[in-house]
Image: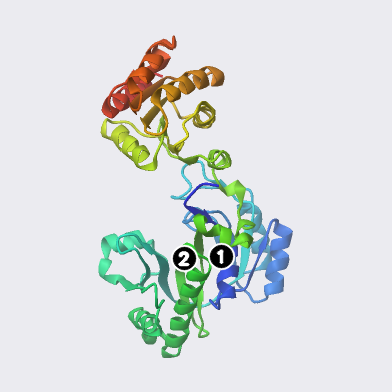
Amino acid sequence: MPQGQMKIHEYQAKRILGQYGVPVPRGEVVENATEAEAAARGLGGSVWVVKAQIHAGGRGKGGGVKICSDLEEVRRNAEQILGMQLVTHQTGAEGQTVKKVLIEEGMDIRKELYLSILVDRNTQAVVVLASTEGGMEIEEVAAKTPEKILREDVDPTAGLLPYQSLRLAYGLQVDKADAKLVRPTAALIGNLYRAFEGEDCSLVEINPLVLTGDGRALALDAKVTFDDSALFRHKALEELRDLDEEEALEIEAADADLSYIKLDGNIGCMVNGAGLAMGSMDMIKAVGGEPANFLDIGGGADQGRVETAFRIISKDPNVKCILINIFGGIVRCDVVAEGVVAAFKNVGLSIPVVVRLEGTNADRGNEIIANSGMGDRLLKAQSLREAAEKSVAAAGNI
């Protein structure tokens, strides 16, 4: 699977948070309109919410969240949302196909708040963020009204302490909305931290956290991602993966033990080493191009791995040129060059490839590239800047 984090759906996140004592609305996930109507009837009440389940935020703005006041409206909106290609600011222009909807009880919302827990890489510690501006994207709040963001840094040895949760509850002005909800809100924050720590999460976000007219504090929405390097401790979480929501090429690369992340540009990148890969992408940007992917083939840049990487990168129709940037340390550049030439022929690439080799046996490797007989389809470069410039030029000629 793609390395870094594993995402899950909202309804799955709420089930996990509920197990840690975080109050969530009553609801049921369904896959067709008949089930949606039955779920609403079973929940009772007079107001329901139909929510599209995809791995992206901004679903409401994209038409994926509807409030309904009768059962027929629940059915109608479920029919409309199920199967739609939902486009949000996080899905890209292609959107995501909605295959499930969550039917939840409606409620009298008195106040909307924001709450999240994540790892701050600057302090190398967990931080709890909160804001009175619930329902808004936290980036927008940070840009326009940063003073409205509350922060509590967590001591990793002590965890989130009760006084910190209470301080956040008062900072959120819960007492002004309903003094009786201060301690329940503080308890919710503490339980949210327990969930974050207990499940090895990389992010837990509740937006909005709502206070209701009937005296409840609960997570109206929930986003949870997990640190996938810790999934060996949580085998049950693997079952929550929805491969339909993940990038197919990233799944294929992970199965081949390659670190690959798809991007929006037209220059494919194949590099050995994460730092070198980031530097290569930066150089492409610096000379006016756009990288199509991050791909680290690791230390074993042999013919088989190069060939697999070629196949994965070339499946992206946006890629017009591939830049290979290899530093020969343990692996020799001449061996890499031989592998590149062989893989190029085996895959049958029709787009140009620019190769920059540095390190052990780089001179011999460059000779192999120059004498490959591939002409303008397989080009060598001495420096990273030259490689990036040649790649941008070659991509522009396709």
Q: Earlier in the sequence, mark 1 or mark 2?
A: 1
Image location of residue 311, percent across then percent down = 54, 28
> Marks 2 and 1: in contact by CB < 8 Å?
yes
The quarter of the displayed image where residue 347 is located: top right
Asked whether residue 9 appears in the rendered view, the answer is no
Identify the residue under disc 2: 204
> Which amino acid lies under the numbered mark 2 shown in the image of this protein?
Val
Q: Which mark is residue 199?
A: none
Left or right of 210? Residue 130 is: left
Image location of residue 220, percent across then percent down = 51, 70
Q: Residue at the spot x=51%, y=66% of the render?
A: 222
Q: Residue at the spot x=45%, y=50% of the render?
A: 90
Q: Element at badge 2?
A: strand
Q: Element at badge 1?
A: helix
User: Does 71 appear above or below 358?
Assistant: below
Image location of residue 209, percent across then percent down = 46, 73
User: Does 378 appear above or below 120?
Assistant: above
Left or right of 148? Residue 29 is: right
Identify the residue under disc 1: 13
